[in-house]
Image: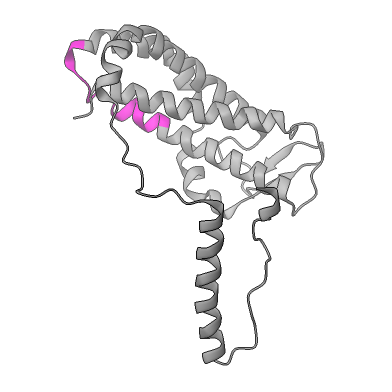
Amino acid sequence: MKNLVESIQILTRFAKEIGNRTGLIVDFGFPTIKIESPCKNLTLLNSLFYMAVIDSVSYIDEYEQVFGIKTEGEYRSRILDVKAINKPLISKIKEWNDLKNLRNQLLAHNLRQGKNGDFILGIDNLNYNAPRTLNDLFLLSNLIQFSTVTIDSEFRDEMKMMGKSTVKDIKLADKQLSKDDVSKITCDLLKKAEQEIIRLKKNYHFTDFGMIDWNKI
């Protein structure tokens, strides 16, 4: 059974990730610039939008299914208080009742620029009830951030006392790959793949399309 601190840590992590992604959307100036498609900027914007939505669904799932239901009973009354305070915020999020469906179908759609310059998720069905514009996403993020503030404020002392004891050690790999390691591994594997191309008498070869520019690293 997941304990209170673990659940709050998960909620806080999702909230921070969502806030960071919407912050990057603003920092890159996406709400005010025109982006031609396809391009790297649009790919970045799509990724930030998608991951923020995905994390928001995970946040609500954790909030509803674990936080307050499967945590320790001794915190029940305080959790109910938190949920009472957060009810207007969470209820607004739930008005997007296709949010989870959007998460499940994200790979089938892309952001496009509308007539007024706003970026809109390219969903044919206009009745699709989920965040579809950047302003929708910003509202979603704000609601999650404020909900998390309530949780962190109510259980600040518990997090301080119990947080350290619930942090699990992450075992690092025996060897961390360097830039040279990555380059060598890639070249070695490509040589093996090229040998198969020759063996199978194919008339194509690998190019550097989409590869990382090592000079920029």
The quadrant the N terminus occupies is: top left
Q: Quadrant of residue 44?
A: top right
Q: Residue at x 48, y 25 (%)?
A: 15
Task: Verify whether residue 172 appears in magenta.
Answer: no
From this view, report whether residue 206 is shown above or below residue 57. Answer: below
Q: Residue at x 80, y 49 (%)?
A: 36
Q: Residue at x 77, y 42 (%)?
A: 114
Task: Verify whether residue 64 appears in magenta.
Answer: yes
Towards the viewer: 151 or 108: 151
Please report the bounds of the magenta region as a residue range.
Answer: 59-74
Residue 118 appears anywhere in the view: yes
Residue 38: x %, y % from top left: 74, 54
Give the colour scheme of this rendering: one colour
Residue 116: x %, y % from top left: 82, 36
Q: Residue at x 23, y 12 (%)?
A: 76
Q: Quadrant of residue 194?
A: bottom right
Towards the viewer: 28 or 59: 28
